[in-house]
Image (cartoon, rainbow, N blue to C red):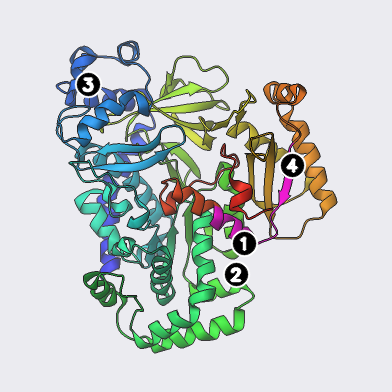
Amino acid sequence: MKHIGANLLSGIFSANEAVHFRNATRDVKAAQTAILLKTLSENKLTACGKTYKFETIDSYREYRQRVPLVEYDDIRPSIDRILAGEADILFAGRPLCLQPTSGTTSGRKFIPFNHALRKQFQRGVATWIFDLFAHEHSLVAGKWFWSLSPVGMQAQSGQAKVPVGFLDDTGYLGPVLGPLLKKSFAVPSEAATIQDSEMFRYVSMAFLLKEADLVLISIWNPSYFTLLLESIDNNITGIIRDIHTGHLSLDTRTPEKLRGYLQRQFGGANRSRAMELDTLFQKYADRKAQLYKGIWPRLRLLSLWEDAEAKGPAARLGRLFPSVFIQPKGLIATEGMVSIPLFRPIQRLLSIRCHFYEFIPVENETEAVPAWKLDAGRYYKVVVTTAGGLYRYKLNDIVKVRGFFNECPCLEFHGRGNLTSDFYGEKLHQLFVAKIINTVLSDMDVSAYFILLAPDGVGHVDHYTLYIACDSPITRVKLDEIREQFETELKKNIHYDYCITLGQLRDMEICYIHQSVDWANSIFLSVMKNRGFKDGDIKPAVLDNQPVWKKEFSIQ
């Protein structure tokens, strides 16, 4: 089969980089310094390089003294020049595209993506791919589902004189590794061009259900895949019919050329598979774990977010696939790759051959320190310097150093560092709220798989509401206990407690969402999409700073 040969070639292509990465873990300072100096040298003639005199910087110490820490708003003027078609602004030449993303403080962002940055991303992915094949040989022979986001959900810029956005995540991987991996895709990446999200889900699940040899599912948000699975219930009759006849149902809004391509990829009639699926759904309709095991008996690995706010949704998805190994993803942002998941050690290691990294200690946000100066057990905010023209750029993602592999830090993601809710000076921070949730729910022995704290009030914000949904019923008494303990923990924030004392805020409320967890997640994803986030890439959150959720959850 073509996909087996492609997988083998992917492994061979990735082997060299995997070896280089392992060697680099033995001398992190040397590996990181080499990347920094190479990046500065290649971009010394750009507008940014001339401003900071890159050609005269020969050490990290000098780089830190010469170049300031920045956020997106600081480089927005340069991004606007790139959008207008200018070259040699932040990096040499022009970008392949500008990749859209949404920021918690900056709104819409456009991140330049060039050949050099793509090579950096490719290094990290190659290390991961080789490690997968080395430790789980069955992945070579099967098909993969690689998360796609419908193009209709992606941001566009009418003023841009350069392309905006990739078709799918393999755009990061270059002309060799990307096409090789796509040959193993159970769902063609072209499905992402379907504009209607319901049709996109139908087509995705039709391809997935037809594929009995699925071995790996690579997604970001576990709730996203849970909702894909939920869509099967409403569409299974049509999907089984399509597999039986070999004709994929696509409405006329789908462009004719795309309909024809997807139909050819769907293949001919597969009556035996249709009958097998029909039997499985009749037998296990109410036993999802047995159903999915029967549909995809060779599935071996789920790659997904599992840290921070994704812990609950990941555990919930894991219950649907109890015999499948769940590998937490590394930390990857549109701006750059931060960590790589590996089997041995079973850790997320700093991707030291991708970009240059610095870290700002969370407890006292002093000057950033390099990767070779990190301390185990401490929390840091990530700063990156990339070949894509980001220099000392604050990602604001918070990580904890769990230890080291040789000299390479092992990182655990703990949330976004710049998301706060602050109407009267209460300064509630996402990391603070996440810690309270972990403490309270653990003490109360409650498994809540959707939970969100947000400002609330009629006419104006005058309190916070904790929205919670569970798979199992929860009593009013238990809810009141959760509310009381949660409020006690919130008041340990002196700013919040002071706002309560002054009467600017009253005590928080708790709101139990009686609909399903999946329903609550679908509402959350819909709101985030409307804010401009990509459909499959929305991070779970436990704090939002917009007082819209009572209306969104249709609560009177």
Residue pointed to by mark 4? 509
Q: Amino acid at mark 1?
A: Arg
Q: Residue at x 57, y 36 (%)?
A: 545
Q: CA distance from mark 3 to mark 4?
A: 50 Å
Where is residue 335? Give x, y as percent: 35, 36
Residue pointed to by mark 1? 319
Q: Secondary structure at mark 3?
A: helix
Q: Amino acid at mark 2?
A: Ala
Asked which quadrant contains residue 274, the reply is bottom left
Q: Amino acid at mark 4?
A: Glu
Where is residue 367? Give x, y as percent: 45, 14
Residue 27 in sight: no
- Specify few, some or many for label 1: CA neighbours under 10 Å numbering under 14, 14-19, or 20 or more: few
- Which of marks 4 and 3 precedes in the sequence? 3
Q: Secondary structure at mark 4?
A: strand
Tell which of 512 and 210 is nearer to you.
Answer: 512
Residue 137 in sight: yes
Residue pointed to by mark 2? 289
Q: Tell me which segment is drawn in magenta.
A: 508-523
- Specify few, some or many for label 2: CA neighbours under 10 Å numbering under 14, 14-19, or 20 or more: some
Q: Secondary structure at mark 1?
A: helix
Q: Quadrant of the N terminus?
A: bottom left
473 horizontally vs 78: left or right = right
